[in-house]
Image (spheres, helix red, strand yellow):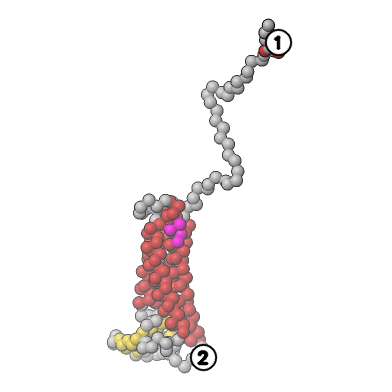
């Protein structure tokens, strides 16, 4: 049962890593709102690396962010968190493969494999938390600007890239927890500082040897 749980968690983690990469590459982290507009001729959408505009004919024009230092701080932080999540996910996949029970590499014991799988699961959880922090932070700023009555720029709504990031974070955390829970505790060793006794019974029973009783008169001899 633990092997199936471990393998399922590993597959979920691999799927979450692929979905995280797809979320980072997705163009629709936020897209312009059409609320209150009768005729919409142009739609704008952005992600962490560029901003795009698309007209009603389907012609798209994208422009990369020229200066990283000129970007808002939350975009820079979200970039870093997503890249860290991908690196942690890649390291977790490599570590988890070495710790799976269905893989045999060298003469690794079951206890060592359990520790390796626990390390891989913990890294996957950290990867999921990094992705969750990035997409949630970005979504919070989009929602804040949308409801701000004094915001004079274009109002945006949540895009598909954010939902993909949330799904990837949930899969990574769930898979990491399953990997951690699949590790069995090793057998407990003997208690130190105590004494252990081992009693065994023979088929003939226990026999006690007794010396024959010798009287004082018989034990002493007189010599003339």
User: Looking at the picture, how far across and down is residue 106, in whole percent?
Assistant: 35, 52
Q: Return the residue found at the far right.
A: 216
Q: Name the mark on residue 149.
A: 2
In this orientation, which residue lies closer to the viewer: 216 or 29? 216
- Which residue is found at the position 40% from the left and 75% from the top? 83
- Which residue is found at the position 60% from the left and 20% from the top? 209
- Crowding near the residue tagged with mark 2, few <14, some 14–19, many ≥20 C-alpha atoms within 10 Å: few
- Crowding near the residue tagged with mark 1, few <14, some 14–19, many ≥20 C-alpha atoms within 10 Å: few
Q: Return the residue found at the far front.
A: 224
For marks 1 and 2, give the CA distance.
124 Å
Residue 34 is inside the magenta segment: no
User: Which residue was labeled with disc 1?
Assistant: 217
- Vertical arrangement, residue 138 with respect to residue 171, above or below: below
Give the main secondary structure of the magenta stretch: helix
In this orientation, which residue lies closer to the viewer: 124 or 148? 124
Q: Which residues are magenta?
A: 115-119
């Amino acid at each position: 049962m633990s092997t199936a749980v471990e393998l399922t968690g590993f597959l979920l983690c691999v799927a979450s890593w692929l979905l995280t990469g797809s979320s980072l590459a997705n163009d629709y982290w936020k897209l312009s709102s059409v609320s209150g507009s009768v005729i919409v001729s142009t739609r704008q959408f952005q992600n962490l690396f560029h901003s795009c505009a698309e007209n009603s004919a389907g012609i798209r024009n994208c422009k990369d962010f020229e200066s990283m230092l000129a970007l808002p701080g939350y975009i820079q932080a979200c970039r870093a968190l997503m890249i860290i999540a991908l690196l942690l996910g890649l390291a977790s996949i490599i570590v988890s493969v070495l710790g799976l029970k269905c893989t045999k590499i060298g003469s690794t014991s079951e206890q060592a494999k359990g520790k390796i799988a626990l390390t891989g699961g913990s890294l996957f959880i950290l990867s999921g938390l990094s992705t969750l922090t990035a997409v949630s932070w970005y979504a919070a700023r989009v929602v804040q600007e949308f409801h701000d009555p004094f915001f004079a720029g274009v109002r945006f709504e949540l895009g598909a890239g954010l939902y993909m990031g949330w799904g990837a974070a949930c899969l990574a955390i769930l898979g990491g927890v399953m990997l951690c829970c699949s590790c069995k505790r090793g057998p407990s060793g003997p208690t130190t500082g105590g004494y252990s006794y081992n009693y065994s019974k023979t088929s003939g029973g226990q026999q006690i040897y007794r010396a024959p009783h010798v009287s004082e008169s018989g034990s002493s001899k007189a010599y003339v």
